[in-house]
Image (spheres, grey):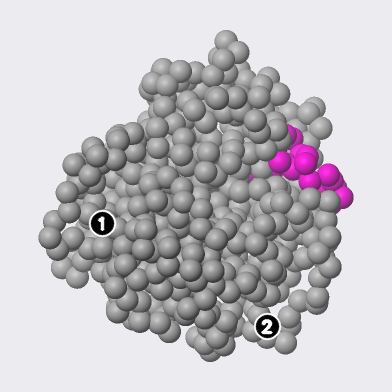
């Protein structure tokens, strides 16, 4: 089929999610085979009016384990645990491998968030590895230039996040952590069919940039599914970072200073210099001063208590932490567990809570260094009680105006822009638990699929398109309007749930705009429906988008619902006034997570909607 998207467009969400199924055996089966592969036990949990007996087994993790968006990444992380490494070591090794095997969604040149449980202290910490707009940014730039190419990028935060995680919580040398990724990039790995399809569909845009075409279009053509895919430039870059650490250690540096040497090699040394040179030569704004001034940021996560459980998620500049916590506060006022599985009111209440929370988040959320967001007020139970009044249990509501939790409400905005349609984002998520009970969830991204589509010079590193509309607001005067140095918003929301201080869940999901919606539904399945982790992951999901976007009150809402929802649920939602668009059976989100029961048993789960995999030992 011909790709009818303009070269400037990122991959359509439904296109990408459907394509991702090509790499999953379950999704390729005919419906009759799917039914045979997972017959429901008599007491299997149900949700959304459809059987949700897990087609995949839960993975036991008695000593620890990793669940990630690709089997090779999950295995690389688990290898670190088996060598005595920590959860931080595991997720960094896994992220490095994801950079190689899922390049359209993950890169050392991307951005992201981590949520970390330090078992010894019992504290939960958030790490933002998110870079800001270059200082030379022209705020009046044509939004089309921010979709891909050298002007679309923000400062790369991901590698700095890798170093921050292992400096604080790791044990193993960086050279050990990068070894699997270096090997797969240098020697190659069989390209997942879904990734091959993504590359083929992005061919026109990748071909615009010679440095990208050299890697992703060898011989001028997309690589074939299961062909051996290599990125030798990336292998050399990762090896040079490992060598910088090794050289420092041989010179007498301690672990901290040796990791700093690798960090400096990336942000001030030869790699940074190559980034800056290539940006200037191709008309971009990134310069060496932008890279030198970047620092990953440790912060307190946003949190709420939902039905006696403490939920921790990413703070600003992630919008999902606010969104997820407010959604939980809103539905806490309804007895979801009492609703029968086939009752459309269950799904209706979730849809309406998401509408209200998104209206609030899109009104206020922005880089806190540039504007004030009333986070505490937005997440208060009193504000949730006020906003819950907008939810009619029997009828679909319009997409509302954001609320006024404090007197510092935004002034009325005039909705006018050259381009109001925002672009989605594409990410990957992974979670790990180690033998000591430390847990980390990470969600990392290059922005829209393939980010800028631009490999930066000779580094082999694909950069993020963090300035795209969606991460930035299209309306002048909005607190999230792009500006030099400002960090755009991400949807990344890796989450940890504690039960009286003990780990219950660590998880995350990719999916751009759908991340908060996906994680909300997963949590409700796990907590209100009391599903085991794999069943909670595989239960049918919905997600919706807004036309023209979520910034505009009154935007038209279309709910995409996986067609495993029962006809009774879909018909009931339509009767309530929802505009329903059925999509494929496994099409929305991709949760990777680990659940701990009261006895301490750990079970990992991975989503069949993409190529996620869990590995324990």
Disc 1 packing (10 Å; few <14; some 14–19; many ≥20): many
The residue sitting at 20% across, 46% down in the picture is 38
- Tally of numbered tags: 2
Element class at badge 2: loop
Q: Which residues are magenta?
A: 135-157
Residue 493 visible? The answer is no
| Cα–Cα span, label 2 and label 1 | 41 Å
Relative to 454, residue 14 above or below: below
The residue sitting at 27% across, 48% down in the picture is 65
The residue sitting at 46% across, 70% down in the picture is 348
Residue 286 placed where, x, y %?
75, 40
**Mark 1 sits on what residue?**
51
Residue 610 placed where, x, y %?
40, 41
Residue 588 placed where, x, y %?
45, 50
**Mark 2 sits on what residue?**
404
Q: Earlier in the sequence, mark 2 or mark 1?
A: 1
Q: Is residue 61 left or right of residue 138?
A: left
Assign the C terminus to one quadrant of the image. Answer: top left
Q: Nearer the viewer, residue 585 or 501?
A: 585
Residue 274 visible? The answer is yes
Relative to 331, residue 288 above or below: above
Q: Is residue 55 left or right of residue 304?
A: left
Q: Magenta region, mostly helix, strand or loop?
A: loop
Element class at badge 1: strand
| Residue 147 falls within the magenta-colored stretch | yes
| Rendering quarter of residue 181 | top left
Residue 49 placed where, x, y %?
31, 62
Assign the N terminus to one quadrant of the image. Answer: top right
The residue sitting at 50% across, 61% down in the picture is 516
């Amino acid at each position: 089929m011909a790709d009818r998207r303009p070269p400037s467009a990122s991959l359509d969400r439904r296109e990408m999610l459907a394509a991702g199924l090509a790499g999953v055996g379950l999704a390729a089966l005919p419906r009759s085979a799917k039914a045979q592969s997972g017959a429901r036990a008599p007491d299997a949990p149900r949700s959304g009016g459809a059987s949700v007996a897990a087609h995949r087994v839960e993975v036991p993790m008695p000593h620890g384990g990793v669940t990630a968006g690709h089997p090779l990444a999950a295995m690389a992380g688990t290898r670190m645990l088996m060598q005595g490494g920590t959860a931080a070591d595991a997720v960094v090794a896994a992220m490095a491998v994801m950079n190689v095997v899922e390049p359209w969604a993950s890169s050392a040149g991307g951005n992201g968030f981590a949520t970390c449980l330090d078992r010894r202290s019992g504290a939960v910490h958030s790490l933002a590895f998110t870079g800001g707009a270059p200082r030379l940014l022209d705020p009046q730039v044509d939004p089309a230039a921010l979709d891909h190419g050298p002007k679309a990028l923000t400062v790369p935060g991901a590698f700095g996040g890798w170093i921050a995680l292992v400096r604080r919580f790791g044990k193993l040398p960086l050279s050990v952590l990068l070894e699997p990724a270096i090997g797969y990039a240098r020697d190659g790995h069989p390209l997942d069919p879904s990734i091959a399809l993504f590359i083929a569909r992005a061919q026109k845009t990748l071909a615009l940039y010679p440095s990208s075409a050299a890697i992703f279009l060898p011989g001028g053509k997309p690589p074939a599914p299961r062909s051996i895919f290599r990125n030798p430039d990336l292998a050399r870059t990762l090896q040079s970072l490992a060598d910088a650490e090794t050289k420092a250690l041989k010179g007498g540096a301690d672990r901290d200073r040796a990791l700093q040497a690798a960090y400096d090699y990336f942000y001030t040394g030869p790699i940074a210099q190559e980034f800056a040179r290539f940006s200037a030569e191709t008309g971009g704004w990134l310069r060496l001063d932008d890279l030198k001034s970047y620092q990953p940021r440790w912060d307190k996560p946003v949190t709420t208590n939902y039905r006696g459980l403490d939920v921790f998620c990413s703070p600003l500049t992630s919008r999902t932490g606010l969104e997820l916590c407010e959604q939980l506060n809103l539905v806490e006022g309804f007895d979801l567990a009492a609703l029968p599985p086939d009752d459309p009111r269950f799904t209706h209440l979730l849809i309406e809570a998401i509408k209200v929370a998104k209206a609030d988040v899109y009104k206020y959320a922005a880089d806190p260094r540039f504007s004030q967001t009333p986070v505490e007020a937005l997440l208060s139970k009193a504000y949730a009680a006020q906003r819950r009044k907008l939810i009619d249990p029997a009828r679909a509501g319009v997409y509302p105006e954001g609320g006024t939790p404090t007197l510092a409400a935004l002034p009325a905005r005039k909705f006018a822009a050259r381009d109001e349609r925002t672009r989605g984002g594409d990410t990957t998520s992974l979670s790990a638990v180690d033998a000591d009970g430390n847990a980390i969830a990470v969600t990392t991204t290059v922005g829209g699929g393939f980010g800028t589509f631009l490999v930066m010079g000779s580094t082999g590193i694909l950069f993020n398109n963090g300035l795209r509309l969606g991460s930035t607001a299209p309306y002048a005067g909005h607190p999230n309007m792009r500006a030099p140095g400002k960090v755009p918003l991400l949807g990344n929301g890796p989450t940890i749930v504690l039960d009286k201080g003990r780990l219950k869940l660590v998880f995350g999901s990719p999916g751009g705009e759908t991340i908060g919606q996906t994680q909300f539904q997963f949590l409700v399945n796990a907590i209100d429906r009391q599903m085991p982790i794999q069943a909670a992951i595989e239960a049918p999901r919905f997600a919706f988008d807004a036309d023209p976007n979520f910034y505009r009150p009154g935007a038209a809402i279309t709910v995409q619902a996986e067609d495993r929802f029962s006809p009774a649920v879909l018909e009931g939602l339509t009767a309530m006034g929802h505009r329903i668009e059925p999509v494929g059976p496994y099409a929305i989100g991709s949760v990777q997570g680990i659940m701990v029961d009261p006895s301490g048993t750990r079970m990992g789960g991975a989503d069949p909607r993409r190529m996620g995999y869990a590995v324990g030992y």
